[in-house]
Each structure stands twice: as structure tokens, then as C-alpha cells.
Image (cartoon, grey):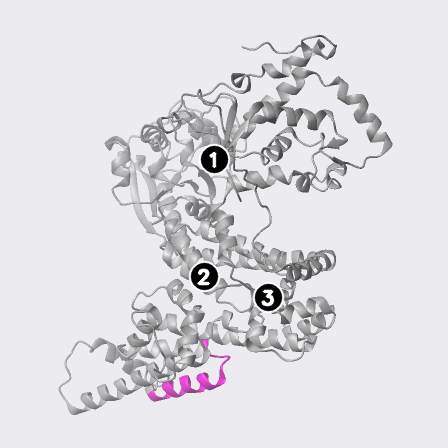
């Protein structure tokens, strides 16, 4: 290796001036074995590439106006936006939890009923006795007493992230009904932890102790106490298929021997088929199980419940545009129907909306009972620059809004809320019409948000509705004409609830109900449903069929009327930018990410994050107090594809040793800082500079921004990333 300088090299010597010329490429970092594609010689490129940090934006005049708005709202309205986001998202998150809890409630109640019956069956053999607990090994003669009641809960999820939340809710549900519950992760059933790890986890959750040696007799002794022995012990294992088969089998065999003294009831999650236990466990362990099957709702059913309970509730306020909804739908499908990923994406969209939209704090008004009063009060206090930015929104320019006053803005938001409520009613009616034909609400929701679909219907008067052939909305309307009488009555009764706020449609729905005489002929409708398969043989049946077909036709026409008059997407209404997030590129970048670009921005704009006193006033000039890697990468922008190590080192050395001069530009510093820098710079030895240089180059290579020298050009490193 090249001789490196010692700490004492700061003293003058004849060779000290030449040490900087002895920098060798392997002094920077040992190079890995080159790939075939890297063995070709790369000639020097004279082109110098600069990274432009300025984003593609409108004209400079618009920039200055936007900067003024941003500066003003950061001081006065940023706290209001943060407060509004916290309120909106807390309601959305609580509603999502309530929706998922409600959709699982029926299954949870079934599981609790089964747990109670299983506990009673175990108690019918023998009650736990404290005198028998002290035995070294409880002897059970009857083989039927050794069976473990096991609930197999089929989750239908490919990813187990949602299952963790589901089994957590199940545990809380059973605890609320008096059960002792322990949740075991499938990771605890690993060959590394063995059965001892499972037992320690059980003791931590049941007995609240962590013994040095795991002993199941401790659990039996605890359960024999009077305050514990009257309730069942439930052990929940989140994912059967991820457990180590031998460890799980040993665990089950041990519990089966203690089942009388410790009446443990197992609940295990299964993501695939009924054969999953047979594929994992040996026959002797399978014989100890007394299984019972339970099935949770599918991811599609849960998704529809979330859409209906959150995004189709006008009281929550936050909305997404057509492209964002399509992206969320595809993201949900690509993530194998994982609700956790969808909820995370929805939260990021909500965060990005409140960060980007200056007037997003007005969204809180939708949560208020008297929205118009809230908006009138807030909009009257808006400064002129903020008020002008509201009427300069693209949706307002398109519709040529009236005078730019706070009252007009409040009226526009109130009208937006009314139109949104009507749109939700129409979507819910469409969903109920297509539900019996397995049309998903998420599909109808995304199609109903399409502004092009609405604009085409509005402009094309000759083609009537202009429904997209093969679209989900068209299918839902067409299916109404084929519904049997009983199903049609149920559908119209649901329409009556969904159209409660739309007077004209509500009255027509009631008229359809009176035609079918739903209230007075409940029993006759059931008889008609049971005889639908029989062929009519009299004229009365023929007339009755014709009458039913006429009602079906009127119901379909009424649904078409809802689509035509009320299915106006939110992106086709003025001021929608205030309450609707439609920038799919920002959401996609946040979810998928661009780590290399982020690293480059962080290195070039490090002072924006560190916010130190010395760098904040430097106007992007290099200072020796900056991090070495930031200095190095900033200096690298002065080179092309290839960076000469010697020149790079000289620039780095000049930056950290001569802080007051950079080229021909002098930096302003206080006398105290000049004195401090002058005293410090001679103390930096040549070895220290080279060590800092090597470390910075190494970090740039690790981050993937540099490629180390090749044998053909050992004096140069190659830049890998250009542009942002």
C-alpha cells in the first residue's frame, strides 16, 4: 500500500508536500471482482452533468405567488391543517376498526359459543384438583379426555398481516366474555426456540411471570386457584402453516396430557385449505385434536365494508379522485388483498392532501353539524391572498365562479357537500342492485368517480345515459330488470333508506313500494318466492308476470335517473381540490419510493434537515462544518461521468482547510468564527484528511451513487446516478 501520513505529519518536511500525490485507488477502497459488463474500458466523458433540484413548475410569476401563499399559511394556517388532519384521520381510523369488528362479530360470537360448549364438555370429565397438580405427571386413562378442542379459523388471506389484527380483536372479544386468552405467534413455534419458548410465552401471558425454567406445572398450579378455575383457557396461534411442525406437535401432545388440569382450548388460523393440519402435523398429534371449522369474511367483503363505512360516508369529509381510487384498487389487488396495505396507502393520501392543499383545514367543516355556519365563519376571516387562491383553483376557473367573496366560497363548499351526498346515495343504490350478481362495491366506486364518464353523459344527449358497455354501472342497471319479485321488494326497501335525503327520488321509490304492496303482502311474497320455479298455467299468473315486469322496468328507469341526475363525480364540482386528493403521482412516489433520488436530495440539501446556524445562512455554499459526504457529493457535481480522484481530493482538502475562500467568492463570517477556523485548520493532518476522504467515498459507494475504479482507469471513479 502507499505510505500513509502519521499524526505527526503536520510538521514541515520536504516530503510532506508530495504525500497528497501518493493517493492510490486501493487506498480508497478495495474493489470487488468486476462483472463482465464492467470489464470493458470506459473512456473519459467531457460532458459535465448537473443535478437540477428545481422541480418542473409553472412560470416564475406563479411561483412567487405560490411562495407568498405558502409563507403566509405556514405561519397562520399550518396548525389548523394539522389539527384538522388529526381529527379527520382519527375518525376514519376508528370507523375502520369498527367496520372490521362488526364484520367479524358474527364469527367471533360463534367462536365464543363453541368455546363455552367445549369448556363444559371438558368439565364433564373432572374438575381441576389442587392435590393432583403436585403430581409429577397427570395420568389420564380415558383416551377421549386427551383430545384438545381446536378451532380452525380460515382467514382466506395470502398475507398474514391482516390476520394478526383479526386474532388480536378475537382475543379481546373472548377476554371481554371472561376467558383467559394468550396469543402465540407462529414465530414462537420455531426449531430455535423449541417447546420451551412456547411455554414461557404462555406463563408470561397467563401467570404474569417469566420463570428461568419453563414448567407447565406452574400453569396448572395457577389455574387450580379459586379465582381462575371457573373460566376457560384459550390459546390463539395466528398462522398454523408458519409453525414448525415438530415443535407444534410436541406442544399439542403435552397439552393433551394436561387437558383436565389445564382445560386449554386451541384456536389456530389457517390461510389455505382444510388439509393444512394434515400436511404439517404427524398422525399422533392429529389424533389428539377435536377440530371445528370457522370462516372469516373474504378480503373483498372486508374491503367493500370499509368503502361503504368510510369513503361513502359524507360525514368524514376526506375524498379521493378517480385516478387515486384506481391506484388504491390496484394496490390492494397487487398486495393480495391485504387491507393493512390499503389502509396505510389511504392514510398516506390523507397526509399528502393536508400537506399540499393550503385550504385543506376547511375540510373539518364537513364533520361539523352546521357545516355552512362553520364555513361562513372561517371563510369570512380568510385574507385576500388565500381567498384568491381558492377561486383560482382549476375547478373554479372551469365553471367561471362569481365574485370572490368568503360567502361565495362557503356557499360553494355547502353545494359541494350536497352534491357529494347525492352521489353517495346513487352509488349505494347501484351497489345494492349489483350485489346479488357479485358486483363489488370497490369496482362501482371507482367507475362512478370517473369524470370523463360523467362529461360524456352530460355532452351526449342523443345516446341517453351513455353507459359504458360492459361497465359495472351498466351491469347493475341491467340486472334490475331480471330480479324476482321478492328480491326486487328487498332492493326497493333498501333504496328507500339510501335515498332519504333526495326528495324527488325518495317519493318515486315509495311509489314503487306501494305498487308492489310490500307492507301488506309480506306472506304472499314468500309464497311467490317458493313458487318461482313453477311454470304459470293461468291468465292470472300471466297478468301478474306482466305487472312484475312493469315494476322491474320502472325500477330500472328510476336507477337510470339516479345515474343521470345525481352521479356527478366530485372532480366535476367547484372547490373539490379543497376536500379531494387527486395527485396520484405523489401517492405512488410515497408508496413505491425513490430511495436513490431521496439520498441525492438529502446530501445536496443537508442543511435543510440539520438546520444548524452555520449552514442555514450559507446560501448553499460549501462549509467545512458540513458532513464530509455532503461536501464530497456536492463537489462531484462539478465533474462528468468520471471523477478524477486527485482533483476530487484537492477540492475536498481545500474546502475543509480553507473555509473563508471558495474560488473567487468569500464567505461572510464573524471575527470570532474566523479566529476559531484559523486556529483549527493547521491541526488537521494530512492523514486525517485522507481518512475522511476515504470514508466519504466509501459511503457514496455503499449508497449506490459511485462505482469504484477499474484496472484500466485506476485514477478515476465513475458516477452512477444523474438527475433527480
C-alpha distance separating marks 1 and 3: 58 Å
Quarter of the figure with the N terminus: top right
Residue 210: image x %, image y %?
A: 53, 27
> Up-down: is 589 above or below 11?
below
Answer whether labels 1 and 3 touch (C-beta < 8 Å): no
Earlier sequence position, callout 1 versus callout 3: 1
C-alpha distance separating marks 2 and 1: 57 Å
Disc 3 marks which residue? 578
Q: Nearer the viewer, mark 2 or mark 1?
A: 2
Left or right position of 516 against 628 = left
Answer whether labels 3 and 2 touch (C-beta < 8 Å): no
Residue 189 painted magenta: no
Residue 395: image x %, image y %?
A: 55, 71
Residue 503 painted magenta: yes
Residue 620: image x %, image y %?
A: 69, 40
Q: Element under label 1?
A: helix
Q: Element under label 3?
A: helix
Disc 1 marks which residue? 223
- Residue in the foreground of this view, choosing between 687 and 658: 658
Magenta: predominant secondary structure element?
helix
- Region of the chain picked out in magenta, as a range: 498-515
Disc 2 marks which residue? 323
The answer to whether residue 285 of the structure is visible from this angle is yes
> Up-down: is 651 above or below 169?
above
Amino acid at each position: 500500500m502507499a505510505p500513509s501520513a502519521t499524526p505527526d505529519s503536520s510538521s514541515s518536511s520536504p516530503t510532506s508536500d508530495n504525500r497528497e500525490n501518493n493517493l492510490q485507488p486501493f487506498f480508497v477502497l478495495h474493489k470487488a471482482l468486476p462483472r463482465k459488463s464492467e470489464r470493458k474500458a470506459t473512456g473519459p466523458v467531457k460532458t459535465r452533468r448537473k443535478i437540477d433540484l428545481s422541480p418542473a413548475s409553472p412560470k416564475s410569476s406563479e411561483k412567487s405567488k405560490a411562495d407568498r401563499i405558502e409563507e403566509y399559511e405556514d405561519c397562520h394556517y399550518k396548525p389548523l391543517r394539522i389539527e384538522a388532519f388529526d381529527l379527520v384521520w382519527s375518525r376514519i381510523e376508528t370507523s375502520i376498526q369498527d367496520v372490521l369488528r362488526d364484520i367479524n362479530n358474527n364469527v367471533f360470537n360463534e367462536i365464543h359459543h363453541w368455546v363455552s360448549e367445549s369448556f363444559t364438555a371438558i368439565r364433564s370429565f373432572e374438575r381441576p384438583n389442587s392435590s393432583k397438580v403436585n403430581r409429577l405427571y397427570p395420568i389420564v386413562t380415558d383416551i377421549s379426555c386427551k383430545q384438545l378442542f381446536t378451532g380452525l379459523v380460515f382467514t382466506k388471506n395470502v398475507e398474514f398481516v391482516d390476520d394478526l389484527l383479526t386474532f388480536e380483536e378475537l382475543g379481546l372479544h373472548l377476554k371481554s366474555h371472561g376467558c383467559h386468552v394468550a396469543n402465540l405467534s407462529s414465530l414462537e413455534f420455531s426449531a430455535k426456540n423449541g417447546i420451551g419458548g412456547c411455554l414461557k410465552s404462555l406463563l408470561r401471558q397467563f401467570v404474569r411471570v417469566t420463570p428461568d425454567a419453563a414448567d407447565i406445572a406452574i400453569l396448572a398450579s395457577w389455574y387450580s386457584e379459586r379465582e381462575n378455575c371457573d373460566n376457560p383457557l384459550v390459546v390463539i396461534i395466528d398462522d398454523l402453516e408458519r409453525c414448525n411442525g415438530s415443535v407444534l406437535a410436541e406442544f399439542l401432545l403435552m397439552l393433551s396430557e394436561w387437558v383436565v388440569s389445564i382445560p386449554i382450548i386451541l384456536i389456530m388460523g389457517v390461510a389455505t385449505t382444510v388439509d393444512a393440519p394434515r400436511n404439517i402435523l404427524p398422525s399422533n398429534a392429529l389424533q389428539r385434536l377435536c377440530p371445528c371449522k370457522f370462516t372469516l369474511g373474504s378480503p373483498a367483503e372486508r374491503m367493500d365494508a370499509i368503502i361503504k363505512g368510510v369513503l361513502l360516508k359524507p360525514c368524514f369529509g376526506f375524498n379521493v379522485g378517480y385516478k387515486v381510487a384506481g391506484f388504491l384498487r390496484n394496490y390492494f389487488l397487487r398486495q393480495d388483498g391485504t387491507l393493512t396495505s390499503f389502509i396505510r396507502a389511504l392514510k398516506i393520501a390523507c397526509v399528502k392532501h393536508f400537506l399540499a392543499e393550503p385550504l385543506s383545514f376547511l375540510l373539518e367543516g364537513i364533520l361539523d353539524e352546521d357545516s355552512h355556519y362553520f364555513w361562513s365563519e372561517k371563510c369570512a376571516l380568510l385574507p385576500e391572498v388565500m381567498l384568491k387562491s381558492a377561486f383560482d383553483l382549476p375547478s373554479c376557473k372551469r365553471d367561471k365562479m362569481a365574485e370572490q367573496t368568503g360567502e361565495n366560497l362557503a356557499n360553494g363548499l355547502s353545494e359541494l357537500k350536497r352534491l357529494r351526498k347525492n352521489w353517495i346515495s346513487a352509488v349505494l343504490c347501484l351497489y345494492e342492485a349489483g350485489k346479488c350478481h357479485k358486483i363489488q362495491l370497490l369496482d362501482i366506486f371507482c367507475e362512478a368517480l370517473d369524470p370523463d364518464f360523467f362529461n360524456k353523459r352530460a355532452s351526449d344527449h342523443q345516446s341517453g345515459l351513455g353507459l359504458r358497455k360492459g361497465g359495472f354501472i351498466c351491469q347493475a342497471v341491467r340486472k334490475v330488470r331480471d330480479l324476482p319479485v321478492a328480491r326486487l321488494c328487498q332492493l326497493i326497501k333498501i333504496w328507500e333508506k339510501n335515498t332519504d335525503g333526495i326528495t324527488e327520488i325518495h317519493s318515486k321509490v315509495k311509489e314503487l313500494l306501494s305498487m308492489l304492496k310490500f307492507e301488506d303482502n309480506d306472506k304472499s311474497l314468500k309464497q311467490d318466492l317458493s313458487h318461482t320455479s313453477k311454470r304459470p298455467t293461468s291468465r292470472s299468473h300471466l297478468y301478474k308476470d306482466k305487472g312484475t315486469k312493469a315494476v322491474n322496468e320502472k325500477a330500472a328507469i328510476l336507477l337510470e335517473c339516479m345515474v343521470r341526475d345525481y352521479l356527478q363525480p366530485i372532480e366535476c364540482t367547484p372547490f373539490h381540490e379543497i376536500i379531494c386528493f387527486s395527485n396520484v403521482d405523489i401517492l405512488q412516489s410515497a408508496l413505491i419510493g425513490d430511495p436513490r433520488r431521496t439520498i441525492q436530495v438529502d446530501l445536496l440539501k443537508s442543511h435543510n434537515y440539520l438546520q444548524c446556524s452555520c449552514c442555514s445562512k450559507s446560501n448553499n455554499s460549501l462549509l467545512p462544518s458540513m458532513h464530509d459526504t455532503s461536501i464530497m457529493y456536492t463537489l462531484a457535481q462539478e465533474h462528468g461521468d468520471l471523477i478524477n480522484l486527485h482533483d476530487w481530493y484537492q477540492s475536498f482538502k481545500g474546502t475543509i482547510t480553507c473555509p473563508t475562500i471558495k474560488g473567487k467568492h468569500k464567505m461572510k463570517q464573524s471575527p470570532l468564527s474566523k479566529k476559531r477556523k484559523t486556529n483549527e485548520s493547521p491541526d488537521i493532518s494530512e492523514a486525517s484528511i485522507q481518512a475522511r476522504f476515504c470514508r466519504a467515498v466509501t459511503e457514496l459507494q455503499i449508497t449506490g451513487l459511485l462505482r469504484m475504479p477499474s484496472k484500466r482507469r485506476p485514477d478515476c471513479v465513475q458516477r452512477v446516478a444523474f438527475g433527480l
